Image (cartoon, coloured by chain):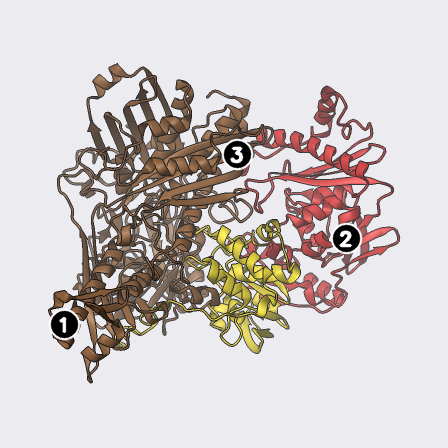
Amino acid sequence: MTGPVGSSPARGGGRDRVTGHQVYAADIRLEDVLHVKLVALPCARARILGIDATEALQVPGVRLVFTAADLPQPAPRFGPQLRDRPVLATGETKYHGDPVAAVAAETLDAAEAGVAAVRVTYEELPAVTSIHAALDPAAPLVQDAALRPGDALAGRNVLREHHYAWGDLAAAEAQAEVVVEGSYTFPMVTQFAIEPHAFMAAPDGDGIVVWSAIQHPNWLQRVIASLLDLPLARVRVIAPDPGGAFGGKQHAKYEPLLAFMARRLGRPVRLVLTLEETFQAVRRGASDVHVRSGFRRDGTLVFRDIRADYLIGAYADIADRTVAKGSYTSAGPYRVPAVRIVARSVLSHTVPSTAFRGFGNPQQIWAGESNMDEAARTLGLDPLDLRLRNLAERGETFIPGDTPADGRWAESVELAARLIDWRKPTAPGRGRGLAVGLKEGPTTGLSYSIVRLLADGSVIVYAGTSDMGQGARTIFAQIAAQELGAPMEAVTVVMGDTAVVPYDQQTSASRSSVLMGNAVLLACRKVQDQLRAMAARLEQVEASAVVVDGGTVAIGERHWPIGEVLARGLGRLGGELIGVGEMRKEALAEHPLGGTAAFYEFNCTAVEVEVDRATGDIVIARHVTVSDVGKALNPSQVRGQDEGAAIMGLGHTLMEHYILDDAGRIRNLGAIDYRIPTSMDLPLAMESAIVENGDGPGPYGAKGMSEGALLAIAPAIAAAVRDATGVVIRELPLTPETVWRALQDPVG
Amino acid sequence: MTATVPIRCTVNGRPRELVVVAHHTLLDALRDDLGLTGTKECCLVGECGACTVILNGRSVDSCLVLAAEADGGTILTVEGLAVDGRLSALQQAFLDTGAAQCGFCIPGQLLAAHALLALTPHPDRAEVEEGLAGNLCRCAGYEQIIEAVLRAADEPAGGARAVEQPMVRQTTSDPAATPDASVAPQ
Amino acid sequence: MRPFTYERPTSLAEAFRILEAHGAAASILAGGTDLIIRLRDGTVRPEVVVDLKAIKERDDGLHERDGRLVIGGWAVMTDIAADARVRRDFTALAEAAQVVGSAQIRNRATLAGNICNASPAADTAPALLVYGAEVVATGSGGTRRVPIDDFFVGPGRTALGAGEIVTSIELPLPPGRRGGVHLRRTRRRGHDLASVTLACAVMDDGRARLAYGSVGPRPLLVTDESGVLADSTAPAEARDRLLDRLLGAASPSPKSMRASPAYRLAMLRVLALRAADIAARRVAGGAAA
């Protein structure tokens, strides 16, 4: 294919990103704005006895101390899965950082002084902050049972249980010649986008405008409209490109609070979280996963039996969906005749967990692939061969009722093995590990795009995707440029404003190149239809005789650039051609996830490590990641997403975790003691490769690919550590101290 | 009463006189008093480097410098890197290698790299890794960032080179527009 | 950040007057990389911040004088780490200064500030201890010299009197061939606070000085006159017994979240041996001190 698709033109918005002119949410200055700061308590759970704002209101510049009492009663609640999150804590705080009040003031200094002057009387209550504690029958209930009417689980700290099964497990157990099992834990980690969340709200006549660097502007619009009882058309969400999101900016957090405050004050309000506050707003669910796998002696999988508990937070957010979806594929990309999966979302007095790159899967893949590595050892087989023996082939149904395997996955595995020299001996002191990751893509979707071909041949694309670094803006421009023959510099992509841009369900699950990409493509095709009609009219032929392709209009042997036909066709009044594209991925009521996978993300990660046995240090000498992307629409951006996901995954593998004290407070709040990888923590050599078979459902055969390289990194490294030292570690992160302890007392 | 301090400094080549709040940082002054929002705010403890600027020839975390300390100083922010709309070699290399993903850390990365190359014009990879270790990138585009710095260092003319290159133009309707302002998508 | 006023004295005399007038309500601002974090988190709440950087007696350089290397009280880590004499004669200090935070931090953080904060984990402290540094403290009553080992009192506490300022830190030039090294343990390879920070200097006759921090309320200095520590060919049991003595005073806090006491103590031994071996190799190589 010639044209922009498949090449790597400069990123859309790239120039503004290197000149400092990119406008992020916190960079927007509103006239007459009031600054908001939150009041929170230094404990995980407390009964609020009273909030005295008298002193705070005397601080010069403080205009409002807003509490739950200022909200309509009963206190409005919201949430994508369960409407359980109050706009402000009501009666009880449920996690360290759960705000009880918000202060609005003329300056940030005054707001901070106001917060310091708010007197909250409270009684600290016992908190449950671990899976074990939350499941104790005597544990306090995190959720008020009244919020879960008719829910049989409402009397426990289990929000939901998910059961998936196929095949005859009992029969398979009888056939298994070797059974390997183990439990694997994954810690609480946080998204740590370098851009802390920023929110603003301003009254707009009888409506409201909300600014938020949110991944799902249309979803937020619905939440605000519902809470404020406004028509959608009176709620405008402006969503500047997020400065990193990683799932942590999918769903509403403090936008509802700001909307209520703005309406109360009749003025714009602004809240920019500190990094510490983002730790208290978003995180990934921790987990404890038990995997039991049965094999024949030759390595053929005969069953997998998986029990997973995820520690979610005090409010559901989208956490239970991460549990449902992450668990659903937990048997892996393998042909497994009998499977039983039980997963529970366990509520706790901790920060509400939410979407985070990988969406519930990294926890399961850490367990499932570590179990495969242990199985290979037990069976005396090469871990690579064990994977290859069991991998589903393209077209093969591996989860009954769902999309068959949509890639030649063995190709990715073999490529990774080749790149890491798997079949060659390892240098002394080193070890190699390999793991695969599978993630179910979006199960439903609805994206609209409008494409306008202007009179001079330039193009405006409207797409409601949020460009949070994945580069969606560039991809859509490439598609439009490809289809309408416009140079890249003549394509403008408009995003991030519900008053302007048509509906998009959401930016998540690595969907945008596929779903919105197809919507853009369809909109372009609609424009091409009009060009065909135009050319047919001008040349007096049937429309079916006109071909529009690669920027030209052709009738038989004659062809013209699109711009020429357009100019003639539009005539003296000018005008433009407008195409609307709609891409749907329909829901299926009977499907356990509500819909089948639009595609699968598949990745194979292979590493070679060196372990310092005296200190427990792991040095990653080589890191290979191979993703099956269908088609790389923009290879440079594919590389950025792959390598970025891989290195981000090194964080939860090697160093990241929340450390709580006995009272459930986060001790390592902030950047000093919550460590993420720096430029000095990279593998000594990294190679990211892709497999392109054009077998994806997206434009030109593309699949989503932004999460894959994060999925399998933890089990690959643990396997390499095992290979180097003989020690099996089943807890993350693999800090030097954890590895050192394991080496002192090797029980694995 | 909030204490203030009058200061004079040169920001991106332009002399500025302003009155800063005594307890405000240089980051606050740049973003809020001068409207130079290219300098980013994240951790506020000198760990992430998003607020990196060059003060008197050296990279600093502007969150850990009081605005008053900048009195008499010369400051370079990301807005001062391009000259007459022409990108510096570093900026161009960041663009060419795809180093900027979400972009939020990029101003800090650019200034840290600028300071590094001023001191070490031809760094090896380890020196780049060390020189940028104070700048977190959560998109973790480190490989492409390092590649960009090494590529810029290879440029014969160093920091001044600029190349015009076709760009994807980017537009959102003016996000700061007042709610009832008419919406112009271009 | 809570409000405060800002003073920028232009002479030591003026600084002393301001510090005297405000007493405990004043905080000294040198590089600010530590102070401003504490101003923000509220662990320090001064009424006035006294910025010392405009003082005319300010010395931010490194000079050789009377058989000593004088490091000005305003010298920043970047310059110390890059200084050829420090790298040659006080290698452990150069290495320690090089890992104090990122380039941005090292461009602001002063050596004087690092020791005045008296963090048990201060990376430069062990090097200053093994090199027998003296702290030059100046106050309205005059100037005095405090051996670095007497300077550290406890976490955040030093021998500095009220209103005194560290105007320089002096290191005696090496009396002979010497090998030195700084090693540390962190949670990642990128910059981090140390869970063990350690310096070792070995003379060509095998005598060794070892100092370590982050394993007790203040950094500690020990010496080995026997030559066993720096002798990699010595029987392992002999070195072990020696380490029992040299490291016996370490008492890591069980409250830290950065590493457990058991791990710190184990790593202290590992680092002590590695450092001794590196320092011994360096003295043998003759290239560094």
Q: Residue at x 82, y 32 (%)?
A: C206
Q: On what subunit does the disc labeled 3 rest?
A: A
Residue under the point 16% across and 46% down: A587
Considering only vertical position in the picture, is A91 above or below A169? below
Task: Name the front one of labels 2 and 1.
Answer: 1
Is circle 1 on the same chain as circle 3? yes
Q: For this view, does B124 lie left or right of residue A252?
A: right
In front here: C127 or A557? A557
User: Where does the image place residue A622, in percent across and percent down from the top left?
Assistant: 51, 39
Residue linked to disc 3: A609
Q: Is residue C196 left or right of residue A364?
A: right
Disc 2: host chain: C
Instruction: State which quarter of the image contains the N terminus of chain A.
Output: bottom left
The residue singled out by tag 1 in the image is A536
Q: Are marks 1 and 3 in contact (CB under 8 Å)?
A: no
Q: Secondary structure at mark 1?
A: helix
Q: How many marks?
A: 3
| Amino acid type shown at disc 3 | Val
What is the number of the mark on residue A296? Answer: none
For this orientation, the residue located farthest to the bottom is: A572
Residue A341: percent from left, percent from top? 25, 29
Closer to the camera, A562 or C108? A562
- Three-letter code, disc 1: Ala
Q: Nearer the viewer, mark 3 or mark 2?
A: 3
Residue A238 placement, left or right of C246: left
On the image, which quarter does residue A213 sit in?
A: bottom left
Which of disc 3 and disc 1 is earlier in sequence? 1
Q: Which chain is brown?
A: A
Regarding residue A732, the answer to whether it shows in the image is no
What is the CA distance from the residue labelled 1 to the residue labelled 3?
Answer: 64 Å
Subunit under mark 1:
A
Q: Amino acid at mark 2?
A: Ala
